[in-house]
Image (spheres, rainbow, N blue to C red):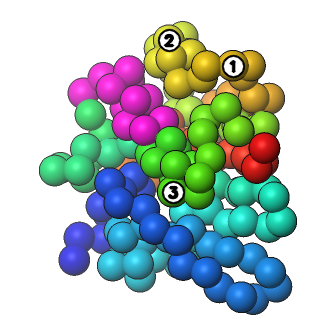
Amino acid sequence: MIPHLPLLSAFAFSIGLAAAGKNRIRSERTVRNNLPFSDAVWHGDTLYLCGHIGLDAKTGRPPATAEEEARLVLDGVKRTLDSAGLTMDDLVSVQIFCSDVALFEQFNMVYRAYFKGEFPARAFLGSGKLLFDARFEVQGIAVKP
């Protein structure tokens, strides 16, 4: 097994864990690599998403451009939401960690295309170096409509 496979998985599925009324969403990749986190956790009508990064599935590295990486990250967030029966418009809060805040506009150009309605509340944080040399890591909170 390759320990640095992308956080983004093409096939997400739910594993219900009855502990404390929480339902966890785990991707095939998370389960296969026995990673110590869930892709998302339901608590009541609120879904808490783990940090998603956008790595090329073949190389396990970030793609050549910031825009392509932003798309991979947001596609992963969208897949996790889809697996929970939600959409990007159900996000109420998003936190973006960025290795270089000079990438703010490149990220925003891609980000805008993922929402039909109003945008969620958001923080864009310069974080310095991210795992696997990623430029972006996105986590969020969504609420069932």
Instruction: Name the amino acid type tagged 3.
Output: Ser
Where is residue 19 shown, x and y percent of the image?
A: 75, 89
Which residue is label 2 attached to? 109
Q: Which residues are magenta?
A: 64-75
The 10 Å Cα crowd at callout 1, few under 14, some 14 to 19, many 20 or more, is few
Instruction: Name the amino acid type tagged 2.
Output: Met
Front residue (pair 59, 14): 14
Q: Of the numbered discs in the image, which one, if any, rests on residue 83? A: 3
Instruction: Name the amino acid type tagged 1.
Output: Gly
- Seen in the image, is 82 located left or right of residue 57? right
Where is residue 96 shown, x and y percent of the image?
A: 63, 35
Which residue is label 1 attached to? 117
Q: Quadrant of residue 115?
A: top right
- The chief SS type of the magenta part is helix
- Seen in the image, is 53 located left or right of residue 69? right
Q: Mark 1 vs mark 3: which is more N-terminal? A: 3
Q: Of the numbered discs in the image, which one, if any, rests on residue 10? A: none
Q: Which residue sits at x=52%, y=71%?
A: 14
Q: Which residue sits at x=61%, y=62%?
A: 40
Where is residue 35 shown, x and y percent of the image?
A: 45, 76
Q: Quadrant of the C terminus?
A: top right
